[in-house]
Image: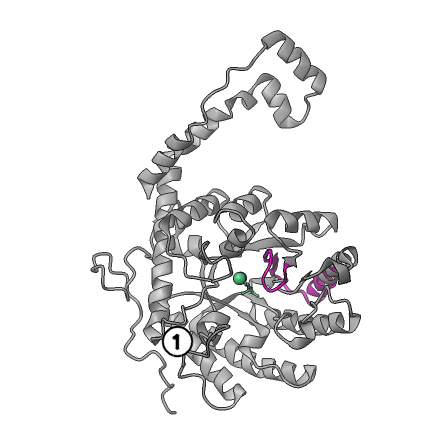
Amino acid sequence: MAAQEEFFGGIPKIPYSPNAGPGDVLRFKHYKAEEVLMGRKMEDWLRFSVCYWHTFCGTGADQFGSPTLHRPWNEGTPMDSAKKRLRAAFEFFTKLGVKYYTFHDRDMAPEGSTLEESNRNLEEITDLALQLQSQTGIKVLWATCNLFAHQRYMNGAATNPDCHVLAYAGAQLKKGLDTAKKLGAENFVFCGAREGFFSVHNTDVAAELKHMANFFKMAVNYKDKIGLKCQFLIEPKPKEPCKHQYDYDAMSVIGFLQHYGLETHFKLNIEPNHTTLAGHSYEHDVVMASAFGMLGSVDSNTGSPDLGWDTDQFPMDIRNTTVVMKVIVEQGGLQPGGLNFDAKMRRESTDLEDLFIAHIGAMDTFARGLRNAVRIIEDGLIAGMVKERYSSFSHGLGQRVEDGSASLEEMEAFIKQNGEPNVTSGKQEKYESIFNHYI
Ligand code: XLS
Ligand code: NI
Ligand code: NI
């Protein structure tokens, strides 16, 4: 049998070399998969995943320019190149040492001219994916359906004003859930890229929200019916491509899920670049989702606040990864979710090795964030200060507020007896200085 084509010749399995020099960017200097921190291996805290769409389908094209990223797997018919791409992807995952990947149905296999043809394409390619998964042990972190790129979805999928389009989305989703089951996906993501509007004048917002909820209910029912054991995740995003998207941010999605009684069936996949697009700080939605027990997974990327769109850059800022990892460790991990690099090469980063450099750099950035977060948590200095700050809720009236048994009458009696409170310093700069000590 002919040897399999190698796509990343000259790049070996990426080693852990903590003493490598600063210019040696094809090695991990911080990420040591097997190292145990707070009782868990680094790889199990981090659960890294490579995304299919940017890393293997990205062309570098933008609104002003044609493709700049010419990949050796883009050869032959669409089905030929889909197979080559898949083999290249598994070579990449293996050399990088990442155990998970994510994909949309339509970036794995090309869309056909009918639903049946699209489904056949997907079946053929996922047969190969299944084979490569069992050869390598690499798994699907999450699968999703692309319900936004085809022109039929220009007015939305689950929120389309025409039920015929909604039905197409439902048919596509049915196959997507079957595919998730076939490949053993641990999660399934819903990204409402066109679920929103450009103009309130032509939009029945209340109807669209209800249709979206009912679409999700169909998904929950079908999942139960086929015995698909995976976590459903909604990925908030405020805008782009729409002017307003219903899944605006973590709190909007949590409110939506609770309003329609769906909150036990879904968690959130937070993408920090979407969080900053919503006008929040990098970590905001990770913090909010976790506070509600709804943080399921993270699309670990970053944006450029000075640009203001979804630039999907690789996360390279140690301050950000430290804050995010602190939340993740404090909630006991992300499993069955993970850290998915929904991040794309700049169109100017044209070498094949840049794909490795970007992922290695981001993995090391998260490994450092994890180490920092663990030191912050183990030292307990910040936690002790926060505990002290809220200590009035651990006894007496505070405890009754805490457990929900206090009344306004009691508040009044307390103030009449105790008078004005002694206000204390918030010490923000002290916290910031201590945090900086760890990074
Ligand atoms: C787009 C989203 C997308 C989802 C999956 O902005 O981030 O990539 O993660 O459809
Ligand atoms: Ni994403
Ligand atoms: Ni995005």
- Neighbour tally class for label 1: few under 14, some 14-19, many 20 plus, Cα within 10 Å: some
Write down which quadrant ligand 1 falls in: bottom right
Visible in this render: residue 33? no
Residue 111 as seen in the image, left or right of residue 24? right
User: At which x and y percent is residue 384?
Assistant: 42, 29
Left or right side of 143 for 64: left
Give the residue displayed 43% in from the left and 61% down from the top: 313
| Residue pictured at 45% horizontal, 88% vertical | 75
- Residue 125, position in %: x, y? 54, 81
Give whichever of 2, 281 is nearer the camera.
281
Q: Secondary structure at mark 1?
A: helix
Q: Quadrant of residue 145?
A: bottom right
Q: Which residue is mark 1?
A: 91
State the image coordinates of residue 126 (x, y, percent, origin top left).
55, 78
Does the magenta segment cover residue 356? no
Q: Is residue 17 left or right of residue 397?
A: left
Q: Please name the residue shown 49% across and 78% down the image.
A: 131
Q: Which residues are magenta?
A: 217-243
Q: Position of residue 376 (x, y in %)?
A: 37, 39
Give the vertical position of 12 relative to 319 (above or below).
Answer: below
Quadrant containing the C terminus in the rendered view: top left
On the rendered image, what quadrant is the N terminus found in?
bottom left
In magenta stretch: residue 241: yes
Q: Amino acid at mark 1?
A: Glu
Quadrant in the rendering for residue 291: top right
Residue 182 is at least partly visible in this image? yes
In the rendered view, tell whether residue 370 sits above or below residue 176. Answer: above
Left or right: 165 as drawn, with respect to 254: right
In the rendered image of this protein, does residue 198 appear above or below residue 435? below
Relative to 182, say whether 290 is above or below: above
